[in-house]
Image: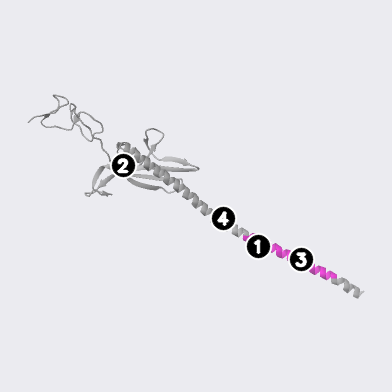
Amino acid sequence: MNGQGGENERPDRMTLRAVLASDIRRGQSLVEVLIAIAVGIIMVIGAITAIVPALRNQGGTVRLQVAVGLGKELMDTTRVFAESDWHNISALSTSSASHYYLNSTSSPFSVRAGDESVVVGTTTYVRYFSVDEVWRDSNGMIVSSGGTLDPSTRKVTVAYSWIGRPTSSMVTYFTRSRSYSYVQTDWSGGSGQEGPLTTVNNKYASSTGIDAMTTPGSMQIDF
């Protein structure tokens, strides 16, 4: 009986060992799977951490390019606006606190006070320009203070930004490069003309020893 019992116990022990070995291998496989999952999660988090700032920076770069383009566009159209008639610019308030933009829906363009909102895609951009007087020293160089006022030059600053972004700006100088000349043959309007002329009239500033009233259109000098 004992011999038979001993013979019966050997297969049972072998079976138990096989089961234990299988459980151990199954446990090792489960641990390996868990480790692989953890490593994968770490890699995914690392990739997301690297990609998200890159996408954010790319989006910021695109917005900056659009904003700069809108600023340059406003600068160019403002220059054309000034060249068409210098008084379009010289008549504006010269202060950085005075914001203007051009209404491009009208022909010719017109000036509007305030900031202009431009929607491109899903982003709202803001742009405007301001005008400042220009002063020059005795050598004709532009100075920040002092000197002599140059009525034929204006400092133009174009500012641009989008929501949540600090304002950037670009600066240039507009100079009246052409003048109009008038030939006046009628002085019958008399004296009293002051300041620069923008249209032809028949007046003059003052006279001494000149009779411009008796025969309109001519001048008689009394000696």
Q: Is residue 87 left or right of residue 219?
A: right
Bin the neighbour count of mark 2 within 10 Å (Cα to Cα): few under 14, some 14-19, many 20 and up.
Answer: some
Estimate how packed mark 3 is, as few (under 14), some (14 to 19) or many (20 or more) residues with alpha carbons within 10 Å.
few
User: Mark 2 and mark 1 in contact (Cβ < 8 Å)?
Assistant: no
Residue 126 image point, x, y percent:
43, 43
Say which label, 1 or 2, has the lower sequence index: 1
Q: CA distance from mark 4 to mark 1?
A: 20 Å
Q: Which residue is mark 1?
A: 35
Q: Nearer the viewer, mark 3 or mark 2?
A: 3
**Kind of residue indicated by mark 2:** Thr
Question: What amino acid type is highlighted by mark number 4?
Answer: Ile
* Residue in the image at 38% along x and 47% along y: 169
Residue 79 at x, y percent in the picture: 34, 41
Q: Residue at x 88, y 73 (%)?
A: 7
Residue 94's disc is 2
Please tell me whether mark 2 or mark 4 is closer to you in this view: 4
Q: Which residue is disc 4 drawn over?
A: 48
Using the rendered image of the protein, determine whether residue 9 is visible from the camera's viewpoint: yes
**Residue 31 position within the rendered picture, expressed as x and y whole percent measured from the top left:** 69, 63
Q: Main secondary structure of the magenta part?
A: helix
What stretch of residues is rendered in magenta?
11-39
